[in-house]
Amino acid sequence: MSIADEPLNRVQRVAAEPSPRRVAWLLFGLLLVTYVVTGKGFTEISDAENYLTVTRSLVEQGWVDISTEDALTPHTLRGTWHVQGPDGRTYSLWGLGYSLLQAPFYVLGKASAAVLGHLVPAFSDLSRFVPRLAVSVVGPLITALTVVLLFHILLAMGLRPTWATFGALLYGVATIAWPYSKLGFYEPFQTLCALTALAAAVHYRRHRRNWALAAAGFALGWGACTKLVLLPLLVPVAGYLLWVVLRDNGLASITRRRLWSGAACFLAGLLPWIAVILWYNWVRTVLQTGQRAADLMFSFAPSVVLSRFVYYFFSPGSGLFIYAPLLLLGFLGLRRLWRHWKAETILGLAMVAVLAGPYLLQVNILDFWSWGPRYMVPIVPLLMIPAVLGMQRLWETTRGRWVVMGFVGLSLIVQALAIATPFGNHYRRVEDHYGTTRAIAYEPGAFPIWGQVTSLLQTSF
């Protein structure tokens, strides 16, 4: 092949690549089916029951209190995760955001149950489970959407479609995003909201579309309406957007009209959710952060911060880099990300700090009944961006390719263990044996990954 033929072949190769829109739809469809098929069709954890009862009340009663009616685990709703309102009704400790997302699916489930009950009378006894089945699709749906969003972010950062597809797909099946797609926790939705804000901010820098400002505000508001921990993200996201505006015009020449129009668009997306948050807290009479008072004890002592950092990132019981090893490759890609996208690197790191920081300062560790670090789920796609660049760098050599395949293979095995058998069975054994699930943090025999292997061996033999 001559040198003259090289540009032509490059053009042909690019032309042969499928369009990003088609790839996005394929990723969405493939992962949505994967998540639904590997899901349970219902959720019984206390968090999921809490949201579902609020959703049921919204749809069937037009109000926001909670009831133990039809709950699979009614005892969990009588604990400390609720607050008594001035009207004597019981209200959830968490926000309305996730329940509002579930409401259309609950309505669809109710309608489907009514139709099936009319067509097949014998089905009527099971009709109350159909709305629950419909709501269980929310987790897979938002996780698949997060994968697509990550794919577009990687494309926006200059990666070829092949690497963007590879990175997004690995996020979907080789990180804790997969197990959490079926559990019913609110963290996947927080992840989608945070990543939407990032994507909208980057889009605004590239295209200067005011709708992106509204989308960023809307995503942050909806996430904060689920749990207020997302509200501090306003600082780095708004700071980044302000930098983009000032970089274009300069502080001296910027027009008031441009500044105020941008602020108005951002607030148009944000303020409706702030209003919902304030109204819901007025109904419950007090400001609720989504945490019990005992869980809001913080310490800046180095020993506390270091121990929490080790626990959430490196411990066998709940370390993020143990449950998603391929994220370690992000340390190799961070330099390349900084070289080409300095402002976005700062924004991403600031978002990681805001999302993870409060849990590193908490005196009481809360995360003892989940697969890996539940509260670190929202930062996983942010860490996946430099990880893809790290994989791309390693892929340039034969030895580096073996390293990438090793990390990817190990990560896939860890997620497969979580999917293959309910990990709650191991936690119950740990609680029975040690008296507490906190043993996963310090007892080798209680480590969840090893517990899954044991559970599978016992099931097989």
Image (cartoon, rainbow, N blue to C red):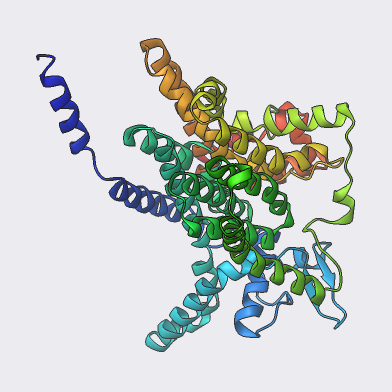
Numbered-mark total: 0
Image location of residue 41, percent across then percent down: 50, 61
Pick the front one: 26 or 89? 26
Q: Camera-side residue: 168 or 51?
A: 168
Q: Is residue 423 visible?
A: no
Is residue 408 visible in this depiction of the protein? Answer: yes
Rendered view: 337 above or below 136: above
Q: Is residue 162 left or right of residue 7?
A: right
**In front of the other: 353 or 370:** 353
- Residue reaching furthest to the front: 253
Q: Where does the image place residue 141, in percent across and percent down from the top left?
A: 47, 58
Q: Quadrant of residue 344?
A: top right
Horizontal side, residue 353 vs residue 39: left or right:
right
- Seen in the image, is 382 located left or right of residue 95? left
Above or below, 284 relative to 179: below
The location of residue 230, given as percent across then percent down, is: 69, 52
Task: Look at 51% across and 31% down and name the residue there.
Answer: 341
Is residue 353 placed above or below 122 in the rendered structure? above
Quadrant location of the N terminus? top left
Q: Quadrant of residue 273?
A: bottom right
Q: Where residue 134 sits: x, y (%)?
A: 49, 69
Which residue is pictured at 81% across the width and 74% down the height? Answer: 282
